[in-house]
Image (cartoon, rainbow, N blue to C red):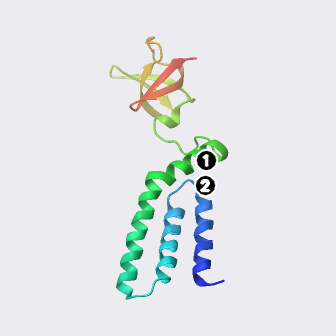
Amino acid sequence: MTLTEALFVIAAILIVIDFFIVSDIPTLIAYVLICFSVMLQFDGPILYKILFGVIFWFVLAAFHYIVWRKVVLRFSNKYIAPDKHLDGARGRIGMQGAIKSSDGKVMVSIQGDLWSVESEKGVSLNDGDKVKVVNEKDGTLIVRSI
């Protein structure tokens, strides 16, 4: 196996790993390996090879953030770990919490964090009410009493 073939195999393994570890790092490293192996195939001055490799990496990185990342997230969401990578307000959908009032502001406490809250049907929320998060809108949790 030649160096170029070995680099392509390692790059392919890193890209497959990206499906299981939803992170950009393995795939971006794979793109560096692909660019290096493609760069080795060209004859010419080293400066042109480096320039070509850098430009090719930026093209692959753009492809990654425009197309590939969405494909990996859809696959991961459907087959591996549904919505495990969600954070922030969207990651709180389905969780339960308690209403807390402070300085006239009503919030919900989920896992020790306070979030702005709205009732699903406009029902007033009282301090201590147990609620379940049913949706999220612009960082505000939409809840239903349980």
Q: Which mark is residue 75?
A: 1
The picture places residue 89, in percent across and down from the top left corner, at 46, 35
Identify the residue at horizontal 62%, vertical 60% (top origin): 16
In space, the residues marked 2 and 1 are separated at their CA atoms by 7 Å
Q: Which amino acid does the dot numbered 2 rest on?
A: Phe
User: 125 or 66: which is nearer to us?
Assistant: 66
Of all residues shown, which one is farthest toward the left? 103
Q: Which mark is residue 25?
A: none
Mark 2 or mark 1, which has the lower sequence index?
A: 2
User: 67 or 99: which is nearer to us?
Assistant: 67
**Residue 9 against residue 98 in the figure, above or below:** below
Q: Which amino acid does the dot numbered 1 rest on?
A: Phe
- For numbered disc 2, what is the local secondary structure? helix
Identify the residue at horizontal 53%, vertical 24% (top origin): 134
Residue at which label 2 appears: 19
On-image quarter of the C terminus = top right
The picture places residue 47, in percent across and down from the top left corner, at 35, 84
Marks 2 and 1: CB-CB under 8 Å? yes
Identify the residue at horizontal 45%, vertical 11% (top origin): 123
The picture places residue 70, in percent across and down from the top left corner, at 51, 48
**Residue 36 against residue 84 in the figure, above or below:** below
Residue 1 lies in quadrant? bottom right
Identify the residue at horizontal 66%, vertical 47% (top origin): 80
The picture places residue 31, in percent across and down from the top left corner, at 49, 68
Of all residues shown, which one is farthest toward the top? 123
- For numbered disc 1, what is the local secondary structure? helix
User: 29 or 127: which is nearer to us?
Assistant: 29
Q: Describe residue 27's horizontal placement relative to residue 117 as left or right.
A: right
